[in-house]
Image (cartoon, rainbow, N blue to C red):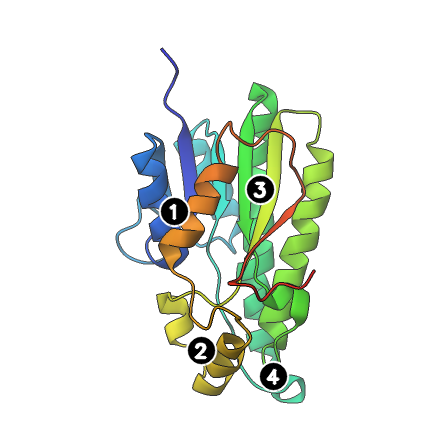
């Protein structure tokens, strides 16, 4: 009998993380959520490398890592962005992804099978106006994943990144209305994406159905993506 696979999902209490958790559970995957919000299986701040390493030791071997934890950060012209807002956005979106990959990927390499799915954003490709911290941090997640995918290419562990356009989630509920209206207007389908639609892509990337793709960028943008 095949062993049940185990997934760790950061930011797993709400939004894309919550939708992904439900979708993977429907496939019979055992899901462990990491979040700073109440209701998580483990309360972990992904910006804290020691806390992430401790969580990895507590959880033990996993097969799937989904990095969904993220923040929008301050929305303003670059010259008005507060330094602490810039640094916090990078701490969560980039350092958090780095910390979890560093803690969980070595075990996947040892076992010869694994799937890493990181969440970036179309903003990381296009550079949304008045969202320079978010856009730059998500560009960093794209590049991090491309590097990681190449490093893992012969190990049986795949690392890919998803770049959604604006999705209807609690995180985007706090985005400034002007910025939200702008990024929604860029979607040819004329609507926001739904978290469940993104979760379907994650489930595929986290499965055995994917075998010859790593370090790749998967757009889910309602037609916004142009490259």
Instruction: Tell whether label 1 touches label 4 (CB within 8 Å).
Output: no
> Earlier along the polypeptide chain: callout 1 or callout 2?
1
Q: Which mark is residue 20?
A: 1
Q: Where is the N terminus found, in terms of image quarters?
A: top left
Is 166 drawn above or below residue 84 in the view shown?
above
> Earlier along the polypeptide chain: callout 4 or callout 1?
1
Q: CA distance from mark 1 to mark 2?
A: 22 Å
Residue in front for this viewpoint, 97 or 182: 182
Say which quarter of the image contains residue 110: top right
Circle 3 is placed at which residue position?
101
Q: Dot 2: within a 10 Å radius of its alpha carbon, few (fewer than 14), some, or many (20 or more) residues? A: some
Circle 2 is placed at which residue position?
175
Relative side of 107 to 68, left or right:
right
> Earlier along the polypeptide chain: callout 4 or callout 3?
4
Is 125 drawn above or below residue 55 in the view shown?
below
Q: CA distance from mark 3 to mark 2?
A: 27 Å
Circle 4 is placed at which residue position?
81
What SS does tag 2 mark? Answer: loop
Is 113 drawn above or below residue 83 in the view shown?
above
Q: Of discs 4 and 1, which sits in the foreground?
A: 1
Q: Residue furthest top?
A: 1
Q: Of discs 1 and 3, which sits in the foreground?
A: 1
């Amino acid at each position: 009998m095949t062993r049940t696979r185990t997934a760790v999902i950061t930011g797993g209490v709400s939004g894309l993380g919550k939708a992904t958790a439900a979708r993977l559970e429907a496939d019979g995957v055992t899901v462990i959520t990491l979040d700073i919000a109440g209701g998580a299986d483990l309360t972990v701040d992904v910006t804290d490398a020691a806390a992430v390493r401790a969580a990895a030791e507590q959880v033990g071997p996993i097969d799937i890592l989904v990095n969904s934890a993220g923040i929008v950060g301050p929305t303003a012209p670059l010259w008005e962005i507060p330094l602490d807002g810039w640094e916090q956005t990078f701490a969560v979106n980039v350092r958090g992804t780095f910390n979890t990959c560093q803690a969980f990927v070595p075990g996947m390499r040892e076992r010869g099978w694994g799937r890493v799915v990181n969440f970036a954003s179309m903003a990381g490709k296009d550079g949304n106006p008045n969202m320079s911290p978010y856009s730059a941090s998500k560009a960093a997640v794209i590049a991090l994943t491309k590097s990681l995918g190449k490093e893992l290419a012969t190990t049986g562990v795949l690392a890919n990144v998803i770049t959604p356009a604006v999705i209807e989630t609690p995180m985007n509920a706090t985005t400034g209305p002007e910025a939200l209206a702008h990024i929604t207007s860029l979607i040819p389908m004329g609507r926001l994406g739904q978290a469940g639609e993104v979760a379907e892509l994650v489930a595929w990337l986290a499965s055995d159905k994917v075998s010859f793709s790593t370090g790749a960028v998967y757009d889910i943008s309602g037609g916004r993506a142009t490259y």
